[in-house]
Amino acid sequence: MSELLTIGEPMALFAAQDPDVDLKDATHFQKFLAGAEVNVAIGVSRLGHSVEYVTRLGADPMGDYIKDQLKLNHVGTKYIDTTADYLTGFQMKQRVTKGDPATFYFRKGSAASHLKKEQLDKIHFSELKLAHLTGIFPGTSQQALDAFNYLLPLLRQHDIPITFDPNLRPTLWSDTETMVRTINGLAAQADVILPGIHEGEVLVGSRDPETIADFFLNNGKYTKTVVVKVGPHGAFIKTKDGQVFDVPGYKVAKVVDTVGAGDGFAAGFITGQLEGLSVEESAKRGNAVGAFGVQSPGDNDGYPNPAELNQFMAAYERL
């Protein structure tokens, strides 16, 4: 039985080891597993919950690496299809000592972007408790968007709550207008929406957390809760019935890499919801997992297990 289902494009990530050097000049790289949805899957699994990941991989070394890493991290692979017709996507990431690193993707026409919607008919929906979706996968191709839109009513039909993180990737879309229209339409199908401040500025036209929350609550067909991630300051929550919470973030001694912090937040929030915590307590856990994420060079290698998370949160409470 699997509690969580997610769908997306996992990639091999080649992270530069040379600090503050342009990617074109970097010569040393370390390989990691990456991709927003896979980050969440690993974070949720590491916190003791079962996850199934839906994707399509190429019959190539990158695809084999990804499948091995998913299994190593106890993420289910029974809904993963492999094809010899297309290659597995990968990405490169700069190493920086301040700010956000530059990234470059090699994913156009990838195996995942050719996922067939018929693959989704194999899913055992009756065993699921939650589905986590993002705005990345539907931007990879029209075929991926069709599969995404095929999945949404299946989840509704089986009464499975949906969390949705916009996770904007403008380079995947033909233009900003198409991206905004499509992602806002997809978000309206979710029970919980997890935008960041920057995403709110693009999708809603505002950096004000409550304005962002109100937009999604008013436009969401099923939306009950909006959690706006406000970086190191934590999260702002507003619910359909008018509850409002400001949940402060956790300070860390050193930020190594900011990529994966938002996915860590989602993993913490989702596991809180699976365990019956309130939205406020779930967001608090999300902030803590995000704090772990920024302290390591990979996108998901720093996420905690339950003991590490509890110890960190308890120690912070004593400060």
Image (tube, helix red, strand yellow):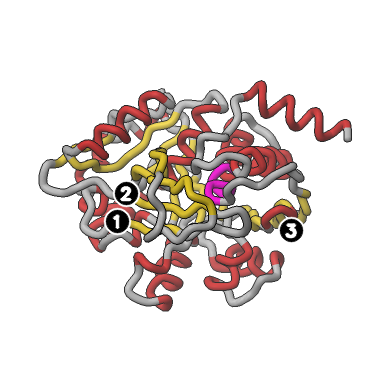
Residue at the spot x=22%, y=36% of the render?
Answer: 61
Residue at the spot x=64%, y=38% of the render?
Answer: 292
Proximity of marks 2 and 1: CB atoms separated by less than 8 Å: yes
The residue lying toward the viewer, choosing from 90 and 148, is 90
The answer to whether residue 226 shows anywhere in this view is no
Q: How crowded is mark 3: few (under 14 residues within 10 Å), some or many (20 or more)?
A: few
The label nearer to you, 2 versus 3, is 2
Specify which label sits upstream in the sequence, 1 or 3.
Answer: 1
Distance from Cα at disc 2 to Cα at disc 3: 42 Å
The residue lying toward the viewer, choosing from 217 and 204, is 204
The answer to whether residue 95 shows anywhere in this view is yes
Residue at the spot x=26%, y=39% of the render?
Answer: 62
To which residue does mark 1 refer?
106
Residue 7: percent from the left, percent from the top?
36, 44
In reply to whether residue 212 is colored magenta, the answer given is: no
Q: Residue furthest left?
A: 85
What amino acid is at disc 3? Gly
Specify which label sits upstream in the sequence, 2 or 1.
Answer: 2
Q: SS class of the residue under badge 2? A: strand
To which residue does mark 3 refer?
242
User: Which residues lie in the magenta part?
Assistant: 259-264
What amino acid is at disc 1? Phe
To which residue does mark 2 refer?
90
